[in-house]
Image (cartoon, grey):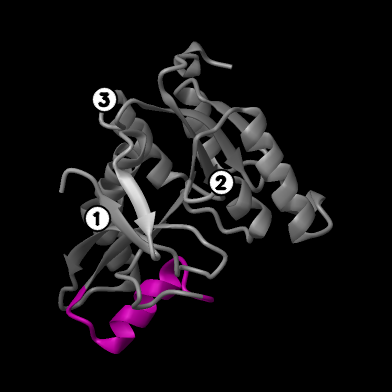
């Protein structure tokens, strides 16, 4: 393990990935700028081998592991292995950064209010089952919305229904394709509010009451 994660005063962050890892890179860059509130990305876990996010991790001296979903017979078995691995690494905060694998209640019970996800829309619009990746932006454009954006929320058993931490709106422009809108939302919203939400957590400023997030000092 890299010495970068050995400071006991830092909140240890585990990032779960399934693809290229652009949101992971945003977190890595934010940490380098000292913008994660004392948090340190200590472990990256991929749900399949060979994804570029793993290379991003190793290039930056972060421990990287593969827990391949296909090697487990059920969601329960996979969720247990994932939770066991995160707990063994002493992870304080789990961040889903383009993690496309279903997990069950074991994760939520063992990391209550300690799992963050970024969704590429303004929840409760264009969220829930089936709304992931380009599907979100296709639906937004089909509806003709003038504003979309991104949401960071705490993960709960109901898909995309957990308490909202931060949101940021992004203009939808004439002639946008799903790919163009996806990129704009990443650049203008996701890559900004995900590191900000992590910072707020690591600074101990997030509390949850009645399914709502309250941010201390605001």
Residue wearing tag 2:
111
Which disc, if any, is residue 29?
none
Q: How far apart are marks 2 and 3 (CA)?
A: 25 Å
Q: Is 145 colored magenta in this rendering?
A: yes
Q: Which of marks 1 and 2 is in front?
A: 2
Question: Residue lying farthest right?
Answer: 73
Q: Which residue is drawn at 27% across and 67% down?
A: 181
Between 175 and 96, the one nearer to me in the picture:
96
Q: Is 126 colored magenta in this rendering?
A: no
**What's the magenta region?**
129-147
Q: Distance between the residues labelled 1 and 2?
A: 26 Å
The image position of residue 191, as x and y in percent, is 29, 47
Q: Is mark 3 on a helix, strand or loop?
A: loop
Q: In this view, does 200 lie above or below 213?
A: above
Q: What element carries label 1?
A: helix
Q: Does residue 6 appear to the left or right of 137 in the view shown? A: right
Residue wearing tag 1:
189
Quadrant including the N terminus:
top right
Q: Residues within 10 Å of mark 3 (few under 14, many from 20)?
A: few
Q: Is residue 110 above or below residue 63?
A: below
The image position of residue 89, as x and y in percent, is 61, 28
Residue wearing tag 3:
34
Q: Residues within 10 Å of mark 2 (few under 14, many from 20)?
A: some
């Amino acid at each position: 393990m890299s010495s970068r994660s050995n400071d006991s005063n830092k909140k240890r962050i585990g990032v779960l990935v399934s693809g290229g890892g652009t949101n992971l890179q945003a977190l890595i860059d934010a940490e380098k700028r000292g913008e994660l509130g004392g948090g340190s990305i200590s472990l990256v876990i991929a749900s399949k081998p060979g994804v570029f996010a793993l290379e991003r991790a190793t290039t930056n001296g972060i421990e990287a592991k593969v827990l391949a979903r296909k090697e487990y017979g059920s969601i329960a078995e996979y969720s247990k292995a994932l939770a066991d691995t995160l707990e063994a690494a002493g992870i304080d905060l789990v961040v889903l950064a383009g993690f496309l694998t279903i997990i069950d209640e074991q994760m939520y019970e063992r990391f209550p209010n300690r799992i963050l996800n970024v969704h590429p829309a303004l929840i409760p619009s264009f969220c829930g089952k089936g709304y992931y990746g380009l599907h979100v932006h296709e639906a937004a454009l089909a509806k003709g919305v003038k504003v979309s954006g991104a949401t960071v929320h705490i993960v709960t058993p109901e898909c995309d229904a957990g308490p909202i931490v931060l949101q940021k709106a992004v203009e939808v422009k004439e002639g946008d394709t799903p790919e163009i809108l996806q990129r704009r939302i990443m650049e203008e919203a996701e890559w900004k509010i995900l590191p900000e939400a992590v910072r707020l957590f690591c600074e101990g400023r997030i509390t949850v009451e009645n399914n709502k997030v309250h941010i201390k000092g605001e």
